[in-house]
Amino acid sequence: MNKNSNLSASSTLTAHPSPLSFVFFGSSDISVTVLNELEKSGFLPKLVVTKTDKPKGRGLTIQKSPVKIWAEKKGIEVLSPISLKDHLFISPLTSSHSPLGILVSYGKIIPKDIIDIFPMGILNLHPSLLPLLRGPSPIENTILKDMRKEAGVSVMLLDEKMDEGPVLSQEKVHIPDWPPTKTYLYNLLGKIGGELLADILPKWLSGEIEATPQDHAEATYTKIIKKTDGLIDKDVLSYENYLKYLAYEGWPGTFFFLKDGEKEVRIKIAKASFENGQFKIEKVIPEGKKEMEYSSYLRGLK
C-alpha cells in the first residue's frame, strides 16, 4: 500500500469469513460487542471499515479504534479511510463482492454511492427504538430522559439521511436495575443488538422479512455530546443530576466549579449516589489533585 495514501489496511489475513459475505463499518466498543455476538453465530465480516488511527492522551500516542484491534486479531482486512470518496477505498469495497454491509457506531455518515455498492443495502444497528432518539447519542439520552420503558435496539436499512431508513426489526429491552450506568447500557444493548442482527441476517438475505417505514412524525433527536455538557449545579440535589452523572460516565464526566481562596477550581465527580430523594456527591477529583472524599476536600477549602 502506498504510504502516502489516506487508506490503511491490515497486512496479516488468517481468519476465514463466514459464507454470508458482508462488510462491517464500525469503530467503538459497542461495535466490538456486536462483532463478538455475530462471531458466536458463525458470522465474520469479509472486510472491516473503521476510523483512522488518532493521537490520544497527554502523550498524543497514536491509538487504533477498538474495531481495528479486534479485526487485526482475527486476521480480517481493515480499511481506515480519511475520505469515503477516495477511489482507493471504494475499489476494495466493490471487489469484495459482498451483497451486504453492516454498520454499528462507525462515526461517519455513509454517502449514497457507498450504500449503492451493496445489492442488499447496509443494515444499521441503532441502540434505540426508532424513530425515538435518532442521532449520535441514543444510549446517553435513554438514561438522561429516564426512558426505562423505552430502552431497546433497532435494525434499520441505511439511507443517506440520519437514522430515517425503514426498520427490519426492533427489540425492547428490560433493565431491572434502573437507572444504569452508560457502560452497562452500552454492553447490554450491544449484546442484544448483536443477537438480533445474527437472527435476521439470513432472513433478510433470503427475503423472509421486509423493512417497514418509520413514522417520522414520532421522531425525537439527540445531539453530539460536548465536554461542557457534563457541567452540573452542585447545589441542585436532583434526580436529573444523578441521571447526568450515570449517562456521562467516563466521558465527558460530570463536574462543577468551587472557589478555593482566590482560585476557581474544576472538580470532577468520581463517585455519586441518589439516596432519600437527593443527589449525593461522595468522591471527587479536584483539578491537579488525586481522588478524595468530597467531605475531606470541603474541609480543606481556604
Image: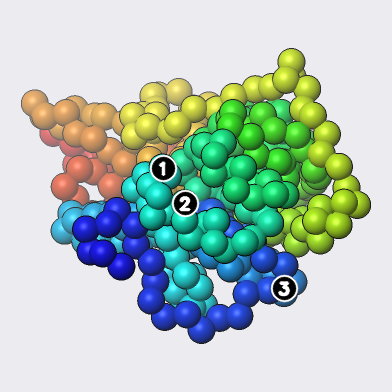
Q: Position of residue 6 (x, y in %)?
A: 29, 53
Circles 3 and 1, Cβ within 8 Å, touching? The answer is no
Q: Secondary structure at mark 3?
A: loop
Circles 1 and 2: CB distance less than 8 Å? Answer: yes
- Asked whether, in this view, residue 161 is left or right of residue 299, the answer is right
Going by the image, does 254 lie left or right of 56? right
Query: Which structural element holds mark 1?
Result: loop
Q: The residue tagged with tag 2: helix, strand or loop?
A: helix
Report which residue position mark 2 lands on.
Answer: 90
From where the camera sits, is residue 121 visible? yes
Q: Of the residues under marks 3 and 1, which one precedes in the sequence?
A: 3
Q: Residue at x 19, y 56 (%)?
A: 60
Out of 72 and 174, give the one closest to the viewer: 72
Instruction: Judge left or right: residue 233 versus residue 200.
Output: left
Q: Going 87% across and 51% down the picture, which residue do you hit?
A: 207
Q: In the rendered structure, which amino acid carries the disc numbered 2?
A: Ile
Residue depth check, mark 3 versus mark 2: number of the one nearer the observer? 2
Front residue of this view, candidates 81 and 162: 81
x, y (%) of residue 277?
Answer: 60, 31
Observer-nearest of 16 and 144 = 16
Hey, what amino acid is under mark 3?
A: Pro
Residue carrying label 3? 19
Q: Above or below — where is 171 with respect to 148?
A: below
Residue found at the very far right of the displayed protein: 208
Q: Position of residue 148 (x, y in %)?
A: 72, 37
Q: Circle 1: is it few (<14), some (14-19), or many (20+) Cα within 10 Å?
A: few
